[in-house]
């Protein structure tokens, strides 16, 4: 059974939280100006970003670095008042996950050449804090051996919206018996391949959580992107130059820049996770995280239930527009009401919400996106 991890075991470990993206499949709740990580989407009273920090603080204390865009920096400061200004890294523009995490690595490398970082998205929902802490502890132990460690999620269905990790043989690490070698990373598959992956038992979902020594991450990145490493170290040494240097960084995800080539070179390990995980990717996913409303049987309600009247419908309703929303006899309905936009769809079409945002952009309605 997992137990609470002693933070003294992790004195060299810092949590890095890339807080970016716009969560377009959760429009109109999530917007470019107010992305999903700033919202309470589970009814906990804490935003997804705050919940991420709450989960990590028992492991790292104040050693939390948040990397976010200039558009969201003030909101992040407001939600995380205890975060020191030195631990908020502000990107001038979106360049993908690799420059964001790489900047954190370069800053940490200057602070401590032996520092281990763990990158955890700001907008995921994770259950069982003790199991999470034990998984991270084992990942840190493996990372101290000079490898890039990912945390893999046991698939619960043949998802086509996630990448996969193909698991290899056990990798001996003292005190970390769950660590396995990674044979390869697999892109998001079609339904047929996803089913075969799940049936084989050899694959885990790639949840985008990475643990690695900061210096090792920069070394791995430098094998294929040496200019990026040079620029990131220059920014870390002279933060005032970030506006000048940042636009020259290649826009790329950490998976493509580091994880995939490192796996091919045998430098990646995985710790299979025993905790529940959800990336809250769309309203169908969100509905599965919310408890059925006591006042509205069959319906999941996000926000104030007094604005919802349900007669014989099932699904999810968010009534944030300040008016009453009535659902009548509609199965699996999704109604998201905000002051300036109303979305009505079904769970079956939740993945298509992203196309609505594209359509609004084509119509010149960036004020709604």
Image (cartoon, rainbow, N blue to C red):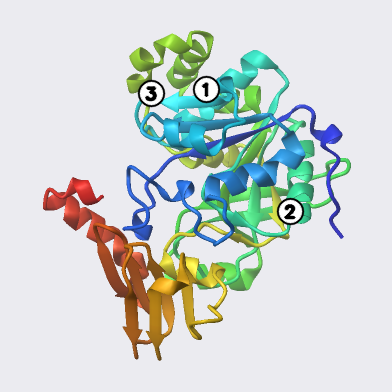
User: As displayed, is residue 232 above or below residue 15?
Assistant: above
Q: Are marks 1 and 3 in contact (CB under 8 Å)?
A: no
- Of label 1 and label 3, which has the lower sequence position? 1
Residue 32, quarter of picture:
top left
- Of label 3 and label 2, which has the lower sequence position? 2
**Residue 222 circle label:** 1
**Residue 249 circle label:** 3
Q: What residue is pinned by disc 2?
A: 129
User: As displayed, is residue 55 above or below residue 318?
Assistant: above
Q: Examine the rendering and report whether any part of residue 125 can be seen.
A: yes
**Nearest to the observer: residue 238 or residue 248:** 238
User: As displayed, is residue 292 above or below residue 289?
Assistant: below
Foreground tag (1 vs 3): 3
Quadrant that contains the N terminus: bottom right
- Of label 2 and label 1, which has the lower sequence position? 2
- Residue at 86% x, 53% y is 3
Residue 149, horizontal then vertical, whole percent: 67, 41
Q: Examine the rendering and report whether any part of residue 257 can be seen.
A: no
Residue 28, quarter of picture:
bottom left
């Amino acid at each position: 059974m997992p137990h609470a991890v002693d933070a003294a075991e992790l004195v060299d470990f810092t949590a890095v939280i890339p807080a970016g993206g716009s969560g377009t499949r959760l429009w109109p709740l999530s917007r470019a100006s107010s992305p999903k990580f700033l919202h309470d989407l589970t009814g906990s009273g804490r935003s997804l970003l705050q919940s991420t920090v709450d989960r990590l603080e028992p492991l790292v204390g104040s050693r939390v670095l948040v990397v976010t865009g200039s558009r969201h920096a003030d909101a992040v400061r407001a939600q995380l008042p205890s975060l020191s200004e030195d631990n908020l890294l502000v990107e001038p523009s979106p360049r993908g996950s690799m420059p964001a995490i790489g900047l954190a690595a370069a800053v940490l490398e200057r602070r401590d050449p032996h520092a281990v970082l763990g990158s955890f998205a700001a907008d995921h929902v994770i259950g069982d804090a003790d199991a999470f802490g034990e998984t991270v502890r084992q990942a840190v132990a493996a990372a101290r051996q000079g490898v890039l460690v990912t945390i893999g999620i046991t698939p619960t269905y043949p998802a086509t919206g996630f990448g996969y990790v193909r698991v290899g043989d056990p990798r001996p690490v003292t005190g970390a018996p769950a660590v396995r070698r990674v044979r390869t990373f697999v892109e998001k598959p079609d339904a047929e391949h996803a089913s075969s992956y799940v049936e084989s038992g050899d694959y885990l979902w790639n949840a985008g959580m990475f643990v690695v020594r900061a210096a090792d991450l920069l070394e791995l990145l430098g094998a294929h992107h040496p200019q990026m490493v040079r620029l990131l170290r220059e920014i870390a040494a002279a933060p005032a130059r970030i506006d000048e240097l940042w636009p020259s960084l290649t826009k790329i995800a950490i998976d493509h820049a580091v994880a995939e080539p490192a796996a091919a070179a045998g430098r990646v390990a995985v710790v299979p996770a025993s905790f529940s995980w959800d990336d809250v990717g769309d309203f169908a996913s969100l509905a599965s995280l919310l408890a059925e409303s006591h006042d509205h049987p069959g319906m999941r309600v996000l926000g104030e239930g007094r604005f919802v009247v349900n007669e014989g419908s099932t699904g999810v309703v968010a009534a944030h527009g300040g008016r009453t929303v009535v659902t009548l006899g509609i199965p699996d309905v999704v109604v998201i009401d905000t002051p300036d936009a109303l979305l009505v769809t079904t769970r079956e079409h939740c993945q298509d919400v992203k196309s609505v945002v594209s359509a609004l952009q084509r119509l010149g309605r960036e004020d709604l996106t």
